[in-house]
Image (cartoon, rainbow, N blue to C red):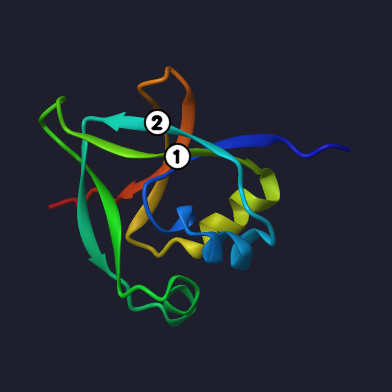
């Protein structure tokens, strides 16, 4: 049985070949796209497993913006169900995965900042 293919938008470390090889054992194919209504902030990573894979202390994190002219450039990759599950394990707890529509009109998963309830 063939696995379901998912679209995943990456604006950060999943674009790095070394991270793709660690997580999926292959280099992903993707296309450039834009996510509107979001901006990038920096998140300090303390998870040693993630640090070992990316070798970067700070990762970008998408934060919903009040300004619709804000946007994030990135790449939409095709992942299998298993690879998407691996991505869920890779992303630290400050991110959560949501489905968004991109400038191209494609719908894809993207990891964004969790909204804090005050």
Residue 106, compared with residue 108, is above or below; it is above
Q: Residue at x 60, y 41 (%)?
A: 29
Q: Nearer the viewer, residue 84 or 76?
A: 76
Where residue 19 appears, as percent x and y from the top left, is 53, 64
Residue 72, compared with residue 85, is above or below; it is above
Q: What mark, if any, has residue 75 been given in the picture?
A: 1
Q: Residue at x 37, y 54 (%)?
A: 12
SS of the residue under disc 1:
strand
- Residue 66 placement: quadrant: top left
Q: What mark, if any, has residue 7 been given in the picture?
A: none
* Farthest-out residue, top: 105
Where residue 54 appears, as percent x and y from the top left, is 44, 70
> Which residue is tagged 2?
33
| Position of the N terminus by quadrant | top right
Q: Nearer the viewer, residue 14 or 38?
A: 14
Q: Residue at x 61, y 36 (%)?
A: 6
Where residue 92 appears, as percent x and y from the top left, is 40, 65
Residue 77 vs residue 71: left or right? right
Q: Residues within 10 Å of mark 2 (few under 14, many from 20)?
A: some
Callouts 1 and 2 close, C-beta under 8 Å = yes
Where residue 22 appears, as percent x and y from the top left, is 61, 68
Q: Residue at x 48, y 59 (%)?
A: 16
* Farthest-out residue, right: 1
Question: Which numbered disc, 1 or 2, marks the residue that appears first in the sequence?
Answer: 2
Residue 66, compared with residue 106, is above or below; it is below
């Amino acid at each position: 049985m063939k696995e379901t293919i998912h679209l995943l938008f990456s604006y950060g470390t999943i674009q790095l070949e070394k991270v793709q090889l660690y997580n999926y054992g292959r280099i992903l194919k993707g296309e450039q796209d834009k996510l509107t209504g979001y901006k990038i902030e920096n998140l300090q990573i303390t998870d040693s497993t993630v640090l070992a894979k990316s070798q970067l202390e700070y990762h970008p994190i998408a934060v919903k913006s009040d300004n619709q002219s804000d946007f994030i450039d990135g790449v939409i990759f095709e992942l299998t169900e298993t690879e998407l599950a691996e991505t869920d394990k890779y992303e630290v707890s400050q991110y959560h995965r949501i489905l968004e529509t991109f400038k191209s009109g494609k719908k894809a998963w993207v990891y964004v900042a969790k909204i804090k309830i005050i």
